[in-house]
Amino acid sequence: MTQPGDPPLSHARRRLALFDLDRTLIRRDTASLYMQHQRSQRRVRLRDTARVAYWLLQYTFGVVDAQRVAAQAMASMAGRSEASLERIMREVYVLYGRQLVSPLARAAVRRHQAAGDWVAIVTGATRYSAEPLATELGIDHLICTRVEVAEGRFTGRVVEPMCYGPGKVVLAEQEAARRGLSLDDAAFYTDSITDLPLLERVSTQVAVNPDPRLRRLASQRGWRIEQW
């Protein structure tokens, strides 16, 4: 994965191919897969699973208070080992996530890689959710929600801006500019109406497994619609 301070790329006209994670590259939300794993290990209660399901339903309809939900989720992680979550999310991907990655998703990533495009996952999830899939697909770049870690443990705080809504645009713009690239020549694949700010910023919009509001808008604007 790239780190702050990496040198800008020399390919000034290189295109960007940006992929959302949940319900796009993976057919389900990684948060629900995490809860499924934790339930199987008897580490969470049924009401915790129900609360996450309610948050995800709100997300689907674009009415969730993402900042509040992220703050609550990370507060519950305060003091927990970062290495432990990394291990668990690798397990989650192997047990549940890998089978939910469509061949069409894999083919789309390979197509952009073969074209020499700069390929990145842009997700509201953290790197712990995205890295296992990124590693398998050979995607070296992640633009995601960042969380604070001190001495190997989570502090319970989210680093602003969160990679959600307008925050996705801010973080993607920063990463592109750092590499001498521009969102003016970018494709973005996503399922969610909550990604409208970034969809409207790029040059090529692809609605993948779109929620009802995004499907309707994509049809109105002539954006590509794909089912993975």
Image (cartoon, helix red, strand yellow):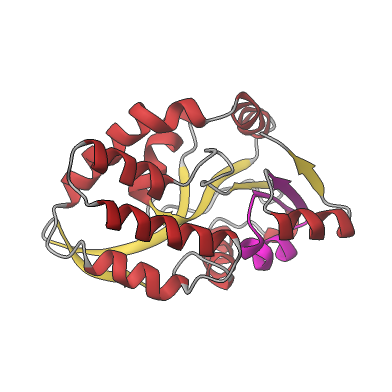
Q: Nearer the viewer, residue 221 or 137?
A: 221
Quarter-of-image position of residue 61: bottom right
The picture places residue 16, in percent across and down from the top left corner, at 65, 48
The picture places residue 24, in percent across and down from the top left corner, at 59, 43
Region in magenta: 186-208
The picture places residue 44, in percent across and down from the top left corner, at 21, 50
Q: Nearer the viewer, residue 28 or 18?
A: 28
In this view, which residue lies farthest toward the front? 46
Quarter-of-image position of residue 37: top left
- The N terminus lies in which quarter of the figure? top left
Query: Where 101 falls versus 143 (above or below)?
Result: above
Query: Where 52 falls versus 117 (above or below)?
Result: below
Q: Residue at x 30, y 70 (%)?
A: 72
- The C terminus lies in which quarter of the figure? top right
Residue 131 appears in the figure: yes
Count of labels in the image: 0
